[in-house]
Image: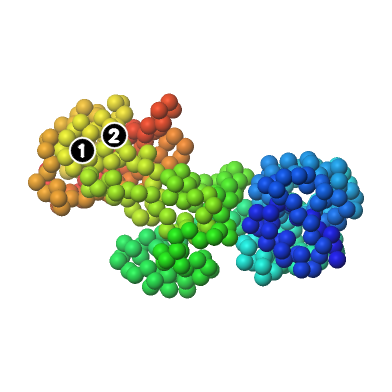
């Protein structure tokens, strides 16, 4: 029997402590309960860190360093960046204790069943290996940096899968298919594990289940991945937008990402909607709404809310290239809605936000004329207001 100190009693820490307590002598500490983690660590052969991020690891390790010795192994299951994993290992090494960076794949049900996958950044001792065996299977990798990086890759796959699941449900809705039938089919694809685990949420029968993996934690991990790998993640952007809009809470289970959506009913007065595959930021949609409203009403005054004063419009009309200033573009609008306005529609088909710059694609169906508008938008550094900097478009069909 090994004496194990579990530091951090969130969802995963509590589940691991409960699982290990059936076999080993387990001591626990959590920040919310107060007191010093040193009491739990003293005399323990293994210290298991189950914390939120790298900053929490540094704080807790700084407190327990005096209690560590060459008879102790610190096993860190926290998801951190590769550089952080290396730095934490070096910090522990100053005490003579061993350090094993060992993030895990799987959530609380996997802990309870002993089916975690443990990414061990180095070969654990026989004693540590026996403890980890109670939690699941150990996959040996080269070191802390590699273990941390692989965990970020795994969570990136999870984020991408959630984005794919969201798109699949949106496509089913667009086709008018019953949600239960869509879930039956998607459940037989590679996304089956996500569907099987939270079908009640995805079928709208449960609103806010107890989280096994919190959306806020995944957002943190995807941010780490983006920073470490210098990549752009659509899943990260979607999570950030949903969290900022309040339609997704940081403590929600990640399955809620599949069905959470911002409220966009305010676009209807411009006969504008957004592709259900897009998770749209309301602030960046406002100038697009104002632009669509100028078409819906025929009133060019709305263009002032849509465009920067220096904006220009370029496109082909009847095979001829036109290049207009904003003042020249106003002349397209008559001041009154088109006679067939009630049959017209507009949709944002693409939206890509990168910091203070964004691009958007809008499809306009105006009678027997279709337009594809491509916008570049900028956010003002002071007010944070988005405006259209330029528009390029294609027009085809007969009409005005």
Q: How is the image coloured?
A: rainbow
- Identify which residue, 387 or 106, lies in the foreground: 106
260 relative position to 341: left or right? right
State which quarter of the image contains the C terminus.
top left
* Element under disc 2: helix
Mark 2 / mark 1, whichever is N-terminal: 1
Q: Residue at x 24, y 33 (%)?
A: 303
Q: Residue at x 72, y 45 (%)?
A: 34
* Outermost residue to the right: 70
* Element under disc 1: helix
Q: Residue at x 34, y 33 (%)?
A: 387
Residue 294 is marked as: 1
* Label 2 sits on residue: 306
In the image, residue 355 lies at what x, y percent? 47, 37
Where 120 sits versus 347, above or below?
Answer: below
Residue 5 is marked as: none
Q: Is residue 192 visible?
A: no
Say few, some or many: other residues with alpha carbon within 10 Å of mark 2 (under 14 / 14 to 19 / 20 or more): many
Mark 2 touching mark 1, by CB under 8 A?
yes
In the image, residue 342 lies at what x, y percent? 14, 50
136 relative position to 335: left or right? right
Where 243 sits versus 106, above or below?
Answer: above
What is the C-alpha distance between the residues marked 2 and 1?
9 Å
Image quarter for residue 140? bottom right
Q: Is residue 42 visible?
A: yes
- Identify which residue, 34 or 172, lies in the foreground: 34
Say few, some or many: other residues with alpha carbon within 10 Å of mark 1 (under 14 / 14 to 19 / 20 or more): many
262 relative position to 293: left or right? right
In the image, residue 325 lies at what x, y percent? 24, 28
- Identify which residue, 208 or 240, lies in the foreground: 208
């Amino acid at each position: 029997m090994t004496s194990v100190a579990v530091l951090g009693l969130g969802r995963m820490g509590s589940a691991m402590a409960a699982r290990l307590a059936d076999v080993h002598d387990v001591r626990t500490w959590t920040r919310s309960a107060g007191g010093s983690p040193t009491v739990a660590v003293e005399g323990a052969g293994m210290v298991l860190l189950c914390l939120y991020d790298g900053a929490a690891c540094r704080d807790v390790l700084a407190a327990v360093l005096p209690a560590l010795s060459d008879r102790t192994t610190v096993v860190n299951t926290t998801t951190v960046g590769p550089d952080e994993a290396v730095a934490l290992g070096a910090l522990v090494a100053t005490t003579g204790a061993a350090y094993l960076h060992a993030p895990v794949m799987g959530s609380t049900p996997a802990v309870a069943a002993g089916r975690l996958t443990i990414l061990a950044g180095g070969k654990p001792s026989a004693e540590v290996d026996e403890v980890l065996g109670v939690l699941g299977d150990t996959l040996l990798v080269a070191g802390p940096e590699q273990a941390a990086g692989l965990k970020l890759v795994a969570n990136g796959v999870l984020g991408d899968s959630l984005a794919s699941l969201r798109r699949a449900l949106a496509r089913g809705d667009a086709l008018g298919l019953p949600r239960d039938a869509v879930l039956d089919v998607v459940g037989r694809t590679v996304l089956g594990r996500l569907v099987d685990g939270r079908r009640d949420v995805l079928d709208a029968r449960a609103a806010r289940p107890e989280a096994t993996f919190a959306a806020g934690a995944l957002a943190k991990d995807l941010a780490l991945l983006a920073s470490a790998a210098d990549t752009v993640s659509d899943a990260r952007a979607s999570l950030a937008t949903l969290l900022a809009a309040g339609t997704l809470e940081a403590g929600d289970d990640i399955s809620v990402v599949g069905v959470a959506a911002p409220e966009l009913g305010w676009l209807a007065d411009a006969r504008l909607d957004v592709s259900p595959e897009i998770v749209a930021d309301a602030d960046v949609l406002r100038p697009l709404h104002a632009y669509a409203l100028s078409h819906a009403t025929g009133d060019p005054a709305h263009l002032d809310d849509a465009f920067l004063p220096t904006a220009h419009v370029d496109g082909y009309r009847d095979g001829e290239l036109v290049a207009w200033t904003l003042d020249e573009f106003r002349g397209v609008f008559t001041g009154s809605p088109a006679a067939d306005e009630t049959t017209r529609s507009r949709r944002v088909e693409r939206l890509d936000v990168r910091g203070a710059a964004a691009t958007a694609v809008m499809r306009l169906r105006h009678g027997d004329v279709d337009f594809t508008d491509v916008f570049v938008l900028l956010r003002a550094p002071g007010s944070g207001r988005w405006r259209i900097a330029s528009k390029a478009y294609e027009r085809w069909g007969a009409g005005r």
